[in-house]
Amino acid sequence: MTNGKSIRKVRKAVFPVAGLGTRFLPATKAIPKELLPILDRPVLQWAVEEAREAGIEEFIFVTARGKEAIADHFDAFPALEETLAAKGKDALLQVVRQATIEAGKAIYVRQDAPRGLGHAVACAREAVGNEPFALLLPDMLMFDEPGCMAGMMAHYEEVGGNIIAVEEVPREEVHRYGVVALDPDARDVMRITGMVEKPSVDEAPSTLIISGRYILQPEIFAHLDETAPGAGGEIQITDAMQRGIEAGEPYFAWHYTGQTWDCGSKLGFLLANVAFGLRDKETADALRAYVNTHCRDES
Ligand code: G1P
């Protein structure tokens, strides 16, 4: 129980996947950037698996024209499964099934124009309905055991409200993110007193950035209705959450200490592939040997 209300279970997760992926052109001319692989699976699948591990049952993708391959990726593929089963390729069969979302549990809604993350979330309103939901930004690949969302969910089941994963970054990087301010008198529960999207170094209230995982109450949709374009001329989820904070709704930070790669950037994408390659028993030894031979700092 929190604030006199019972804590409602989080069953649904929203994945904004409508972005054009211009930073990866020409690779993303015909392939959605969310389907570019980190090791052996699309960057988006890592986020779906993180949500599934946290108990999510319904997966809502906010998509756009040209992103149809995302729905194909998560569909069952009986002909492929039968072929693999007939050949006794059980391990591959498992891998293919792991990439499948059960029929009726994947919902695709369209964002008609690139008007920002807040607008993308607003497009999921009917699919989410009047219940809390998780929001995962798939560009941010997060690895921990248990996963970031599973940790947040356990915390949510104790405190309720809205939970935002935050990470510490060097001060010179805060301008790339949403940044939170914490209540100095409530450090133990990490209550958030305010947040600002892409502040300058001088304006940033802290060095705790919003890292791309959220548990939100459905009140956010009413706040999004009232939110004017902000940073970058886009409707920002951070600005809508700030309205919720001002309305007295509870927002708590959850300090994530696992690893994160921003796979929306070339460097983050490459580093994630190296990191996952070094974890995989098929590739680890040869990759480590390659890195040791070719990546020495000669300076
Ligand atoms: C979005 C959010 C921002 C958050 C970031 C994490 O920004 O608006 O608050 O810190 O994701 O990656 P974007 O990366 O879409 O500019």
Image: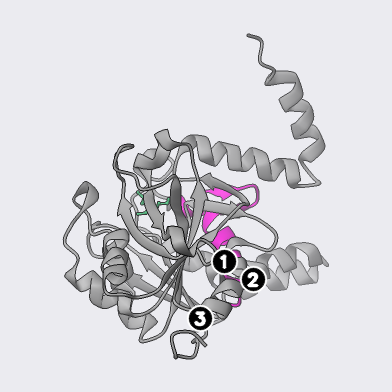
- Asked if the magenta segment contains residue 296, the reply would be no
Provide the residue designation for mark 1. 149
Where disc 3 sits, the SS reads loop
Left or right of 123, for residue 72: right
**Quadrant of residue 74 within the rendered picture:** bottom right
Residue at image position (58%, 53%) is: 142
Please say if 75 is above or below 172: below
Q: CA distance from mark 3 to mark 1?
A: 11 Å
Q: Nearer the viewer, residue 240 or 111?
A: 240
Q: Residues within 10 Å of mark 3 (few under 14, many from 20)?
A: many
Q: Which mark is residue 250?
A: none
x, y percentage for residue 240? 27, 66
Callout 3, which amino acid?
Val
Q: Amino acid at mark 2?
A: Glu
Q: In the rendered image, which residue does mark 3 sit on?
A: 10
Give whichever of discs 2 and 1 has the lower sequence position. Answer: 2
Query: How would you rate the neighbour count of disc 1 (Cα within 10 Å): few for under 14, some for 14-19, many for 20 or more?
Result: many
Task: Name which quarter of the figure residue 117 lies in.
Answer: bottom left
Assign a secondary structure to mark 2: helix
Tell me the distance, in whole angstroms, between the alpha carbons under discs 2 and 3: 13 Å
Residue 285 at x, y percent in the picture: 82, 36
Q: What is the CA distance from the residue labelled 2 to the residue labelled 1? A: 8 Å
Residue at the image position 49 percent from the left and 67 percent from the top: 72
Do the CB atoms of the residues marked 2 and 1 lie less than 8 Å apart?
Answer: yes
What residue is pinned by disc 2?
53
Which residue is found at the position 24% from the left and 77% from the top?
222
Extreme top residue here? Answer: 299
Residue closer to the observer: 252 or 288: 252
Q: Mark 3 and ligand 1: say if the CB distance to the nearest ligand atom is below 8 Å.
A: no
Magenta residues (range): 33-55
